[in-house]
Amino acid sequence: MNTNIQEQEFNGNPEECTISPTSLDFSGITLNANDCLSNAGKIAQKYNFCIIIEGVLYVKKKEDQYVTLVRHAWNYDTRTKKYFDETVKLDEIKNNTIDKNEYKYFKCCEYTLAYALEHSKPQGFQYSYNDLIEFIKSQLGRRYFRPRWTCGRYNAEKHVAIMYNLLAGYSFFFESYSADVVGCILEVGRDGEVDVNATARETNIAPESIRAFFANLYDNDLLTNRVCTEEDLLQMRKDLSILKTHNPCNHVQNIDELTIARSDSEILYYNAVATPYTITSAMLELTYNCSEKCIHCYNHGATRNDNEISYRNNREELTLEEYKHIIDDLIAHGLVKVCLTGGDPFSNKYAWDIIEYLYSKDIAFDIYTNGQRLIGKTERLANYFPRLVAVSLYSTNATDHDSITRIKGSCEKSMTILRQLSELSVPLNLKCCIMQPNLHSYFSITEFAHQIGAYPQYEIDIRDSNDGDLCARQLQLTKEQLSVVLLDTNIADNLIDDLSRYKTRECRTDRSSCKTGFDEFCITPEGNFQVCAAFPMPFGNLKQLTIDDIYEKSLCLKDWQTSVIGQYDKCGKYEYCKCCKPCAGLNYIEHKDFRKAATKSCKMAKERWVMLKTLEKIEKFPSKSQLYDEIQHLPIHTIELKRILPNK
């Protein structure tokens, strides 16, 4: 930026003067040099007044809130109609008489004061010279702290970083110099002070630029101006909770139930740091034990009725020290985020210790739970700032929900936990599988999710058990039921949204059928290292091997990572394949060969293709109320709840 602007004479308004050769882009606002000169006064008028500190222009938008707008402004003398750079003393500014219809700018030794007086200033607005001086001093002397609700990861080699505001549930991607600064921030412990000058020395970036960047981070609650007290945190939680519940999440979350959701910021960071050996996220199945007995559970050894014997606990689970060793190994490979699941993760006696360890290591974590073991512990969980808590809730109708969990009162407990977490502004997701028992009431989840500021997530694919049990097939919706239910646009895989794209959708056969098993893996309760929770093909066991050992020795892993859909026996060969979501895990469970298409997947793709072709002839779809009324009149099929093993 060339700030040695030559004096220029011009006739007419300041807008007619042009200055080159640059433009400014800051905080999403682009102004060219001429705009800075000609419009600074207008900016001051619009926002009451503006202040320039070490070359950074701040405008006051509302009470006690300043927004950084542009990096530079030049002085303009309305009498001589020339731009100049003039150094004056503070007392000269204080005693200077400024015509209220003119704008004048003064550059001081350490900061610049832009002081605008307008005859059209807002009625009742009052400010004083001392107010401006105090603000300047506060900016120059402002202290910054890293809040306890932040975590993240910095990659020095790629000069990229990701940082989380876990209180609000947001993540931010940084690159180049901004990433280097974030790297310095993340080195400071939570509630520790982040020194502007020390950061400037470490990164070789000018202090004024660091200060401007910190101001932006402060606006996004990635930095604070003091160590927050418990009272501060409680008030922030209340404010965020009110904001979420008054602005409900109206969009559908299109997230596979068995993979870890990724934000745009995470995708940018993961792509930037990707190598064949980088692991950015992991799913830890802490246990297959659970405080509920869901009739559709796909975990090994799950029962379908109370007369059956559970084999959920027939394994030697990892110890706490083994978990710490595995987490450290994952961190060495680039870990950013973990999802804790089960069973119910809180059925593992080490669950809280693992959460504490992840928090101490600056690892973001999600939790998939039913909430039953969180009674009286929601505040404890909130103080670890989970990135997301996803709770299984199948209906707000207790009879329907409890018939699925086989635990009386579980519906009310889960809803109570969700309300408490919402009041603490914990980011929430409601996970609802739609099946025969909750067909008539599943949609009640949407309204409840809106009430507590959560995301509703529906799933229609009831999976076969990982141990081969086929009981879940009885729970699946029939073709006739699906043809109605899939008109519900609150379901991610609904037919209406797919109608305009299904024929032109490209069936890519040159890539893997799944995103996991590359930079994301699952670790089972006994330590098996595998693609995901629903693909029980182990690449090795982390009790005996390190991750590097598995990368080096596992032929199964190499086979998986080099496989593409085109190698599968049926995939991509038929027109209806455009409606398929091929799952290598289902293939493996049915055939012990992930390249052989699962019967269920092909059946679903064919049915969906036919349903979409049928819908093309319909001119008008039912309203939500009409649709839900029709769903409530659909017959529910009687099911026999018992384990069904192939060939037995």
Image (cartoon, helix red, strand yellow):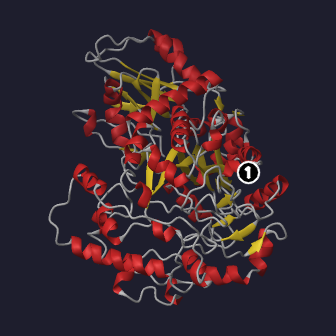
503 and 461: which is toward the camera? 461
| 111 relative to 77 in the view: left or right | right
Amino acid type assigned to the residue bearing label 1 in the image: Asn
Residue at 76% across, 60% down? 332
User: Residue 95: x percent and y percent?
Assistant: 45, 9
Give the class, few, some or many, for how many residues have Cα within 10 Å of label 1's Cα (few <14, many ≥20). many
In terms of image quadrants, where is residue 497? bottom left
Numbered disc 1: secondary structure:
loop
User: Residue 248: x percent and y percent?
Assistant: 39, 40
167 and 347: which is toward the camera? 347
- In the image, residue 471 above or below residue 205: below
473 and 96: which is toward the camera? 473
Q: Quadrant of the C terminus?
A: bottom right
Residue at 53% across, 57% down? 261
- The residue carrying mark 1 is 348
- The total of numbered circles placed on residues is 1
Find the residue positioned furthest to the front. Answer: 307
125 and 563: which is toward the camera? 563
Residue at 59% across, 44% down? 371
In terms of image quadrants, where is residue 82? top left
Is residue 81 visible to the viewer in this orientation of the structure? no
- In the image, residue 260 above or below residue 64: below
- In the image, residue 457 above or below residue 569: above
Is residue 476 visible to the viewer in this orientation of the structure? yes
User: Residue 502: x percent and y percent?
Assistant: 31, 74
In terms of image quadrants, where is residue 254? bottom left
User: Residue 330: x percent and y percent?
Assistant: 74, 61
